[in-house]
Amino acid sequence: MASSVHNNRLSPQRSFACCRACNMWCWRAFKWLPVLLVVSIITWSYYAYVIQLCIFTIESTVQQCIYLIVYHMLLVMFCWSYWQTIFAEIKQIPEKYKLPEEEVEKLLSAESEDAQRTILDNFAKDLPIVTRTMSGSVRYCNRCVLVKPDRAHHCSICSRCVLKMDHHCPWVNNCVCFHNYKFFMLFLGYALFYCLFIMSTCLPYFIKFWKGDFGTSASAGRYHIVFAFFVALMFATTLGSLFGYHCYLVAHNRTTLEAFRAPTFRGGADKNGFSIGVFNNFKEVFGNSPSVWMLPVFTSAGDGCEFPVRREHQLQTFTTQDAHGYESMGTTRSSEDGAHETERWRLCPRRARTAPQIV
């Protein structure tokens, strides 16, 4: 009798756990639908362009070879960049930004907001952060229980803080951030050229179709070619505006979030606070080696936690004894971080460390 009562008590809990697990997996599957839609369109475009246009419609062998070579080059770079954007490893915030349990207990037991700000200021005095909240306090995430590095934000969809977060993109089912922003830019660029190439090469056949001179030999696939032209035109228009906007952001060293709300420094908000010149801004995303600028391999400068700032904010840059300080605008050096090397931007010589003041 007791065992049956015990089982009856446990069954609702098990049912609730099963429902939560089912909802979680359904939500994860649902988030992949935009990616599957993009993959489906790419697969269909391959059939429409390679099979229907190049093989069944174009009669010139030379024209077929040129179209196929250029098309496959763009397709490979487009898919490679897209893959990297989706599956790039988004690393966790370093442990030094996370509050220990004793600091969390102090924060929770603080009697006022001023006391909480003092606790956070004392903890963050040795961290290399220069940005603040609008009230002048240290940026803190109570869900991840950590002090936010400069330009880091909490993503409600990923349920974690992300370094140099730009936005969460449903079309890649991932956050666009420090670790994959170069891949995202290349994905937009190659996708745009992919669509422009399909649109320009299908245009003559679209005109023939419009005039009724398409011919009967390709009548079975002519609708695929015409539809490919319209789809490429539609996506080229959207991608052109999006790619142009992100080129503007790269040139001014801003993220999408920073474009809507300027980062706040101890001296106030400054939308150009991280801008160090157009070329240096470009190299911060794409790296110093021109030979790999157009390849979807990670070459971005820095570690995603520290960034160069404008001269008026340099006095606010704090460095720790084991961190690499900044030396000069737009220069980099290599340093060993664990098992691999990364490049860290440097702005000014090491200065005497002082505790940040609340303004």
Image: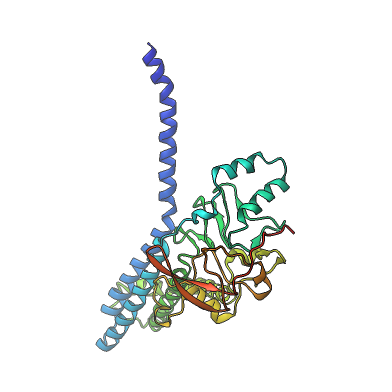
Q: Is residue 172 left or right of residue 224?
A: right
**Quarter of the image holding residue 255?**
bottom right
**Quarter of the image holding residue 66?**
bottom left
Q: Is residue 56 visible?
A: no
Q: Is residue 295 left or right of residue 307?
A: left
Q: Is residue 245 above or below residue 163?
A: below
Pinpoint residue 283: horizontal percent, then vertical percent: 50, 77
Residue at 63 percent of width and 43 percent of height: 107
Which quadrant holds the C terminus?
Answer: bottom right
Q: Is residue 18 visible?
A: yes
Between residues 228 and 140, which one lies in front from this camera angle?
A: 140
Between residues 293 and 325, which one lies in front from this camera angle?
A: 325
Between residues 61 and 119, which one lies in front from this camera angle?
A: 119
Coloration mode: rainbow
Pinpoint residue 332: horizontal percent, then vertical percent: 50, 76
Residue at 36 percent of width and 67 percent of height: 42
Which quadrant holds the N terminus?
Answer: top left
Q: Residue furthest right?
A: 359
Residue at 54 percent of width and 61 percent of height: 167
Pinpoint residue 286: horizontal percent, then vertical percent: 47, 75
Between residues 170 and 126, which one lies in front from this camera angle?
A: 126
Q: Is residue 230 left or right of residue 312?
A: left
Total numbered labels placed on residues in the image? 0
Q: Is residue 206 above or below residue 340?
A: below
Pinpoint residue 184: horizontal percent, then vertical percent: 46, 68
**Quarter of the image holding residue 329?**
bottom right
